[in-house]
Amino acid sequence: MEDLKKIKLTRRQWLKALIISILSIELMYVFTSLSKNNLRRKQNKSMYNAGKLSSFQPGQVYPFGTQKLYLSRFEDGGLLAISTRCTHLGCMVQANDNGFVCPCHASSFNQYGEVLSSPAIRALDIFPVEVEKGMVMVDLSSPIKRKGFDKSQLHYES
Ligand code: FES
């Protein structure tokens, strides 16, 4: 009878070890999947090469109609990639001397994409900008919604 108790205890320990092993394998699988998904997401970035940084003059706005963006370079050298998509109903905004205007319902936006007049109530979306080997790269896969502009949204290249 005592031998039987020992076997039960051993079996219980064995079962406990088995459960812990299965849970460990499950956890490893979950963490591996998560890191693979993060890597895949990073690789799926849709980086658009807008051109050489030196070709963008300060104080100018450059349209990239097929990419649905305007690339603005401000007087201090800051870069801002602004979506052409109006935040009211999605029409394509057009650049003018004051910023941007929407031809559909006349919303207007300043040079930073902030709303000047409704019906739009939210600033134009922006895209992350990087400069790699002197080329301006815009991440079209990650539009950023925002309420307004702040200087941290500008990209500076030192
Ligand atoms: S879609 Fe631009 S103002 Fe309506």
Image: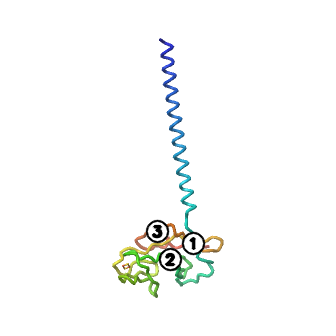
* Screen quadrant of the C terminus: bottom right
- Crowding near pointer 2: few (<14 within 10 Å), some, many (20+)? many
Query: Mark 2 touching mark 1, by CB under 8 A?
Result: yes
Quadrant in the picture for residue 131: bottom right
Q: Is mark 1 on a helix, strand or loop?
A: strand
Q: Residue 69 carries which label?
A: 2
Colour logic? rainbow
User: Residue 88: horizontal and vertical position, in percent?
Assistant: 37, 75
Viewer-side label of 3, 1: 1
Residue at x-position 53% and y-position 35%:
21
Extreme residue toward the front, this view: 66
Q: Residue 145 carries which label?
A: none
Q: Earlier in the sequence, mark 2 or mark 1?
A: 1
- Crowding near pointer 3: few (<14 within 10 Å), some, many (20+)? some
**Position above or below: 49 against 58:** above
Indicate the quadrant of ligand 1 in the picture.
bottom left
User: Residue 135: horizontal and vertical position, in percent?
Assistant: 62, 74
Q: Considering depth in this image, is 38 or 65 the residue closer to the camera?
A: 65
- The amino acid at mark 1 is Tyr
The residue under label 3 is 144
Q: Is mark 2 on a helix, strand or loop?
A: strand
The answer to whether residue 53 is left or right of residue 96 is right
User: Residue 87: horizontal and vertical position, in percent?
Assistant: 39, 74
> How far is mark 2 from mark 1, CA to CA?
10 Å
> How far is mark 3 from mark 2, CA to CA?
13 Å
Q: Considering depth in this image, is 15 or 118 the residue closer to the camera?
A: 15
The residue under label 1 is 48
Residue at x-position 46% and y-position 84%:
95
Q: Is mark 3 on a helix, strand or loop?
A: loop
Residue at x-position 52% and y-position 83%:
61
Viewer-side label of 3, 2: 2
